[in-house]
Image: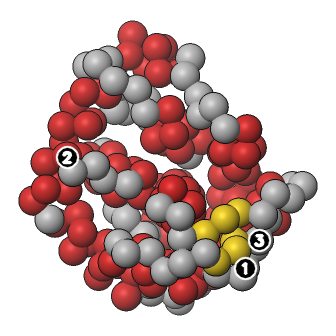
Amino acid sequence: MTTDISLRAAHAIQRQGKHLFSPLDSKAFVCLIGAVVFALEEVGAVRIEPAEPAHHGRILPRKMPEEAHLQAFYLRAVDKSVVAFFLDCTAEGETLQAEKDAFFHALASEPVKTDNEAHLARLQQGETEDPLLFSLLSACDLSRGLFSPPVYAALEETEPTDPATRTMMETLPLLWMLRFVK
């Protein structure tokens, strides 16, 4: 079993003792919502319309994802811009209860736990690369606590090859500032 980027990111965030979907861990929140957008695109549920700046691209629907932990996010995201989706998910008073329930259920699944643990262990030992996960964690200042300095340096040299992905990664700190820095 291979977990999607949203579950890999959630696992890495939890390993650092951060809360998922909590404004108290705002950078972790932005990282996870960014990972959800990438996961929706990865499974073919949406397409992000290219835009300048990238976070104004519309999230165009393709098909409902089969993965239960992405379905409520899909319904929330379609036909919004990326920034509107982020602001909606992080709005004051927003609980994301359906999204949280499905996400925590998926994370608790034994095959997902096993895959996430094995994948993170291979990354920490420098045996594999995951440029998207590393970029997500780095953009939100969550990567240094997970990797030893030599592995961190090696991972820092890798980056997602897709230019649209790289551009979207650059917007995550901006999305965090738009919502959480006042």
Instruction: Report the side of 151 relative to 155 (left or right).
Output: left
Alpha-carbon span between mark 3 and mark 1:
5 Å
Tell me which numbered mark, 1 or 2, is placed earlier along the sequence. 1
Residue 88: which quarter of the image?
Answer: bottom right
Q: For residue 18, say whether it is visible.
A: no
Q: Amino acid at mark 1?
A: Lys
Give whichever of 160, 92 is nearer the camera: 160
Give whichever of 31, 145 is nearer the camera: 31
Alpha-carbon span between mark 1 and mark 2:
32 Å
Q: Please give the residue where the numbered disc 1 appears in the rendered image.
A: 80
Tell me which numbered mark, 2 or 3, is placed earlier along the sequence. 3
Q: Amino acid at mark 2?
A: Asp
Mark sitting on residue 58: 3
Relative to 85, does residue 132 appear above or below in the rendering? above
Say what secondary structure mark 2 lies in: helix
Badge 2 crowding class, 10 Å Cα cut-off, few under 14, some 14 to 19, many 20 or more, is some
Badge 1 crowding class, 10 Å Cα cut-off, few under 14, some 14 to 19, many 20 or more, is some
Tell me the quarter of the image containing the C terminus: bottom right
Alpha-carbon span between mark 2 and mark 3:
32 Å
Badge 3 crowding class, 10 Å Cα cut-off, few under 14, some 14 to 19, many 20 or more, is many
Mark sitting on residue 115: 2
Relative to 102, does residue 27 appear above or below in the rendering? above
